[in-house]
Image (tube, helix red, strand yellow):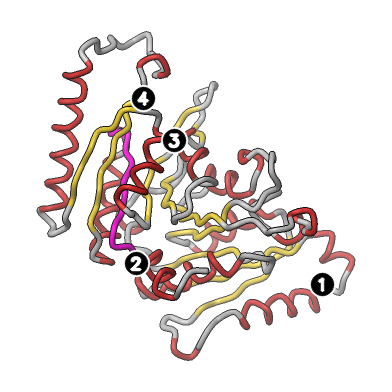
Amino acid sequence: MQTHFEKRALAAPDRILVATDLSDTEYLVPHAIAQAKASGAQVTLIHALPPSDVVPMDAATIPYVDKIKIVRDLRVVLLGLAREFESRGIPCESAVRDGDPADVIPQEINRTHATRLIIGSHGRGRLGQLTLGSVARDLVPAVNIPVFVVGPHAQTGVRHATPQRILHPVSLGFNYRESLHLALDIAQVYRAELILLHVLDPDVAEKVDPQRTIDWADDALRALIPDASKLAPPVRTTVVSGKLAEVILKTSNQTKADWIVLGADGAPRGWPFHQSVAYKVLSAASCPVITLRHERARNENAVDFKEVHFTSYS
């Protein structure tokens, strides 16, 4: 069980790892600078250089044949980015590592003791449409620290670097408290307005007195807010029935949320991540999303994930 200090460290990290493919620095760097300054963090920039036999080759480009030159050029670029952080008073180191990003990044998290990972995700599917990149798909359900994802449809303006309004969907099922504490702490770090959202299953809303069910859920959300009178800005609550991913995305747009804090994982073993609500939100959100992997229940068979965990099913 995490201590209060450890939980607070997730909201205000002292070490941030920024994983970049160097095509995303224009929008990742402003976020990393803002977050590092907010918590006084040290930053590590990492670029993973996959084996040549797994790098997709664009027929319109000429492949490098001199790996030493590739690494040297990459290090020069990363050093230039590191100087941008240091010019703002933020300690920053950089490194190029051989290997698949899905393997290299967790290793760097362990090496640096980072308590936040920042990644971009502007991949493109077979038809050219924007999709959630494969690295984000692999890492979000795998690493045990908050992952800040600038998704393929996220706005990348300066306004989103320092959040003023944060949306957090709450499942009211097991393990929801981990991401709830993260959302509460982040809101206090940035003095941001926090909106707690609970989504009711449409079938439940129809079978039970709708207003009574909404009132019960709203009371349950309010009961989760610690020392509400001491929080500034105050925490808002809202309860809506509908399909989880659709409601989260719609509410995010309606409230003009700058960040979404989203609990991830919890799906039964073998359930593909690309079918989870977390994946759908990351793929379509118009603002950055910070995810926190929830630990699974000890007895998965005893839990109806469809009812209690918003990141498992649509």
C-alpha separation, residue under disc 2 versus residue under disc 4: 31 Å
Rendered image: mark on residue 210: 1
The region drawn magenta spans 13-23
x, y percentage for residue 26? 27, 41
Q: Residues within 10 Å of mark 2 (few under 14, many from 20)?
A: many
Of pointers 1 and 2, the one earlier in the residue sequence: 2
Which residue corresponds to mark 2? 12
Foreground of the two, 211 or 294: 294
Where does residue 158 sit, x and y in percent of width and height? Answer: 30, 55
Label 3: element kind: helix
Residue at the image position 44 percent from the left and 67 percent from the top: 165
| Up/down of 200 relative to 68, above or below | below
Using the numbered discs, state the Cα–Cα distance from disc 2 to disc 3 in whole angstroms. 25 Å
The alpha-carbon separation of the residues under discs 3 and 1 comes to 44 Å
- Amino acid at the residue labelled 3: Ala
Q: Which mark is first along the chain, 1 or 3?
A: 3
Contact? badges 2 and 4 (CB < 8 Å): no
Residue 17, magenta (yes or no): yes
* Mark 4, other Cα within 10 Å: few <14 / some 14–19 / many ≥20: some
Q: Amino acid at mark 4?
A: Pro
Callout in the foreground (1, 2):
2
Ranked by sequence position, the earlier of labels 3 and 4 is: 4
Mark 1: amino acid: Pro
- Residue 271 occupies quadrant: top right
Q: Is residue 169 left or right of residue 30?
A: right
Contact, CB < 8 Å: mark 1 with mark 2? no
Residue at the location (53% across, 64% down)?
A: 179
Give residue 288's position: percent from left, percent from top: 43, 52
- Identify the residue under disc 3: 102
Location of mark 4 (residue): 50
